[in-house]
Amino acid sequence: MRVLGRIPRALGLREAGVYYALLLLILALAGVCAALGRPGYLSAVNLINIVYQASPVALMGVAMTVVLITGNFDLSVASVAALAAAVQILTVDAVGFWPALLLALAAAGAVGLLNGVMVQLVGINAFIVTLGTLTAIRGLVLIVTGGRSLMVQTPAALAVMTNFESGRAGPLPRPILYMAAFTLLVWLVLRFTTVGRRIYAVGGNAEAARLCGISVPAYRIGAFVLSGLAAGFAGVLYASRFGAMNPTALQGEELTVIAAAILGGTSLFGGAGSVLKTVAGALVLYTLTNGFNVLNLGANYQGLIEGTVLIAAAALYTLGGRRRAPRKALTIIRGELPEAVCHKTRC
């Protein structure tokens, strides 16, 4: 009976709104394309291409969701991805693909660790810290590359990189599989493990989490490291796709990543969010982009419509969120609170 009682809520506009929006958007674009005599929008090739294009942003968005759940956010992801791409291309000819990938991830993870330490241990606001690293890392990329595009020189290294990014498993490009595996792993951790419950608790009520014995700094720093690693992997995918990188590559993508999380209903105040809905949010954005390309609409319309969709989604979740219980985070960790603390916090 309890499960049946949750079904209407799970199918409600707030819980499933992003899925409805994605479905309606696809059907609307398919209808417009059919009316204009354009090629079948619902073809498997086109739908797979949308997911393929969205994969790097969705992958970063999943990690961004974890950061947002803990009550912070990370503006530096696009610059970190560009740094990882530069490290990958600069080292792959000398050391080979896999060592270069590890170096790229190490550099990206180090930036994530720096962000986490500065925010959580030094106490600087996350907006200031990650805005600073966004600018500093982009400047570092320009210095390392000399402001010039980089290219892989060794044919063997280029072949491995191309296969890593453009290879297929059946009909699906590998980036889709990477994104799906990472999303599934993070979803399982958040949904079914103590670590996941504590991540939500840290963002929902940090003081109650601390009273439970949860190391709030460790979880928040860990979220930043995860964000850095995900951005680094996205950067490696970018470098592998083209076998080259421009020092201004991925500029502005951090806003797309955050927009995907917001469209998925992740709270900017912490304690709430779903990685599955973040992926759906990324697909909404790239379905719009794909629709603009298919219909030959200019970039001016794209910015206007995407901005409107984002504001509308934020308004919907904000209005719906006013009905939520203010102490949801205490419910999440209720089983872990000592009896004295439970009495003190009235959970």
Image (spheres, rainbow, N blue to C red):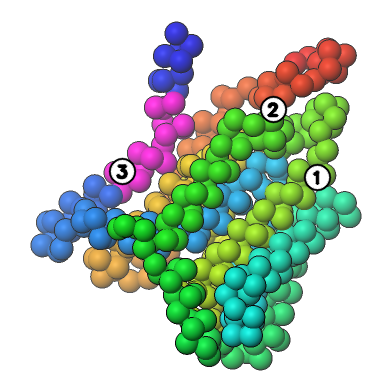
In the figure, is residue 185 to the left or right of 43?
A: right
Question: Image point 45% across, 22% down: which residue?
Answer: 9
Queried whether the magenta region covers residue 333, the answer comes back as no
In this rendering, the label closer to the viewer, 1 or 2:
1
Question: Horizontal and vertical percent for residue 127?
Answer: 73, 57
- The N terminus lies in which quarter of the figure? top left
Task: Identify which residue, 268 or 237, lies in the foreground.
Answer: 237
Question: Horizontal and vertical percent for residue 306?
Answer: 42, 57
Q: Secondary structure at mark 3?
A: helix
Question: Horizontal and vertical percent for residue 68?
Answer: 65, 46
**Residue type indicated by callout 3:** Leu
* Mark 3 or 2, nearer chain start: 3
Residue identified by numbered label 1:
218
Question: Image point 52% across, 88% down: which residue?
Answer: 154
**What's the magenta region?**
10-25
Q: CA–CA distance between discs 3 and 2?
A: 31 Å
Please name the predominant secondary structure of the magenta segment in the image: helix
Q: CA–CA distance between discs 1 and 2?
A: 18 Å
Q: Is residue 334 visible?
A: yes
Which quarter of the figure has residue 175? bottom left
Q: Secondary structure at mark 2?
A: helix
Question: Horizontal and vertical percent for residue 46?
Answer: 26, 60
Question: Image point 71% across, 55% down: which residue?
Answer: 225
Q: Secondary structure at mark 1?
A: helix
* Mark 1 or 3, nearer chain start: 3
Task: Identify which residue, 297 or 193, lies in the foreground.
Answer: 193
Q: Is residue 310 visible?
A: no
Residue identified by numbered label 2:
329
Residue identified by numbered label 3:
23
**Residue type indicated by callout 1:** Ala
| Other-residue count near label 2 (Cα within 10 Å), few / some / many at <14 / 14–19 / ≥20 | many
